Image: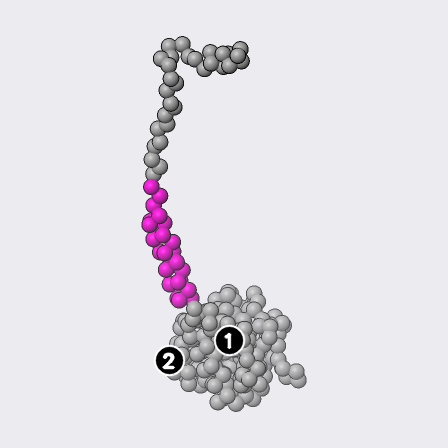
Amino acid sequence: MSGSNSSARDAAVPGDRGAAEPLSFTVHSLPALDVEGGRRTRLGRLKMLLVLLVCASPVIASYFTYYVIRPQGRTNYGELIDPQRPLPALTLHDLEGQAVDAAGLKQQWLLVAAAPAACDAGCERRLYLQRQLRETLGRDRDRLDKVWFVVDQAPVRPEVLKAVQVASAHVLRVPRDELARWLVPAPGHALEDHLYVVDPLGNWMMRFPADADPEKIKRDLGKLLRASQHWDRAGRGS
């Protein structure tokens, strides 16, 4: 038939010797994937993450235990401040009138007293307690600083100044109204009636009662330092 002949003629190529030669393909081998190298890389990264997790776990655990769990049965003597109150940009000066950066108070636990420069009998007692309590902490005493915020511009009595210098307390002047916006006394009490605890992050987190029991304060301080032993460090204390 004409259609068949036409198809046959179309299939014939000039110079063709008869049967059409089959098409051939050259297959190039692909580069081998470094499966073993990739597995080693992933394994190395996993090990590194595990090491970092192990190193960070004490910090995570101490924060979680102290700041999150807070069991209702906790027998703390001081009043926990909730929410904690971060250290503001207080206008601080030393007794020579030199400005002091409030952020420099961080990275240490602080046991804080506040009083006018005249320092009455109650003030002297609290400053004495600061010194004695710190010494009772033994090897942990360098993790706690004593701070006296002087809330007026009057001269500090020489005998009081000598006592606090011997005790290596940090004496800083601050306007009373500024300090009172951060540290708040218990109802019915004045700012000057308490000892306050500030953590190494600069958060006011505990207030002890007026005329507090030294043994109970010592117990609370010991608990705080034990709970935080993996994430704060000895520093300015002496």
**Is residue 203 something that shows in the picture?**
yes
Q: Main secondary structure of the magenta part?
A: helix
Task: Name the image quarter holding residue 152.
Answer: bottom right
Give the residue at the far front of this rendering.
1
Query: Residues in magenta?
Result: 32-56
- In this rendering, is residue 114 above or below 31? below
Label 1, label 2: how far apart the Cα atoms are: 22 Å
**Is residue 150 something that shows in the picture?**
no
Q: How is the image coloured?
A: one colour
Residue lying at 36% horizontally and 56% vertically, measured from the top left:
43
Residue lying at 53% horizontally and 85% vertically, measured from the top left:
75
Q: Secondary structure at mark 1?
A: helix
Residue lying at 63% horizontally and 82% vertically, measured from the top left:
186
Residue tagged 2: 139
The number of discs equals: 2
- In this rendering, is residue 12 above or below 218? above
Residue 142 x/y as whole percent: 40, 76
Closer to the camera in the image, 222 or 178: 222
Residue 56 x/y as whole percent: 42, 66
Closer to the camera in the image, 69 or 209: 69
Dot label at residue 155: none
Callout 1 environment at 10 Å: few (<14), some (14 to 19), or many (20+)? Answer: few
Residues marked 1 and 2 touching at CB (< 8 Å): no
Q: Secondary structure at mark 2?
A: helix
Does 49 appear in magenta? yes
Dot label at residue 66: 1
Type of amino acid at the residue the image marks with label 1:
Tyr
Quadrant that contains the C terminus: bottom left
